[in-house]
Image (tube, rainbow, N blue to C red):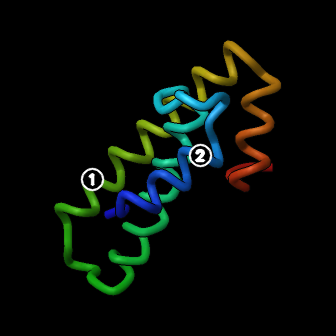
Amino acid sequence: MLTTRKKAAIIKDAARHDADTGSPDVQVALLSKQIDELAKHLKKNPKDFHSRRGLLQMVADRRSHLRYLEANDKRRYNAVVKKLGLKK
């Protein structure tokens, strides 16, 4: 789980403007960090199936946000993917 400080740092880094907290760019950045932390947890606790389900839901949610960005603003999509090191 992300602490408030970590979350604020991620939002500040990914935000498009000062008050931006809900754009797809920010959502993808937050989900990516949560996915990384949960993946580490699951490596230590391989039988935690409830957390695994949550991880799969987060991956699907991130994929939806990325699909939306790709369809509506290809330049922002490429910037987010490159910044977070997701694909390519």
Residue 40 location (% of width, % of height): 42, 77
Residue 80 placement, left or right of 9 = right
Q: Which residue is the extreme one toward the top?
A: 72
Total marks placed:
2
Apparent side of residue 10 relative to residue 42 in the rendered image (left or right): right
Residue depicted at x 49% and y 39%: 62
Check the image and report above or below for 63 versus 49.
above
Say above or below: 19 vs 53: above
Residue closer to the observer: 36 or 6: 6
Residue position marked by numbered label 1 in the rendering = 54
Give whichever of 9, 40 is nearer the camera: 9
Cα distance between the residues tagged 2 and 1: 25 Å
* Vertical comparison of 1 with 64: above or below: below
Q: Which residue is mark 2?
A: 12
Q: Secondary structure at mark 1?
A: helix
Which residue is found at the position 79% from the left and 47% from the top? 82
Three-letter amino acid code at the position of disc 1:
Gly
Of 68 and 14, which appears nearest the observer? 14
- Circle 2 or circle 1, nearest the eye: 2
Residue 75, x across and y down, in percent = 82, 25
Pick whichever of labels 2 and 1 is earlier in the sequence.
2
Q: Amino acid at mark 2?
A: Lys
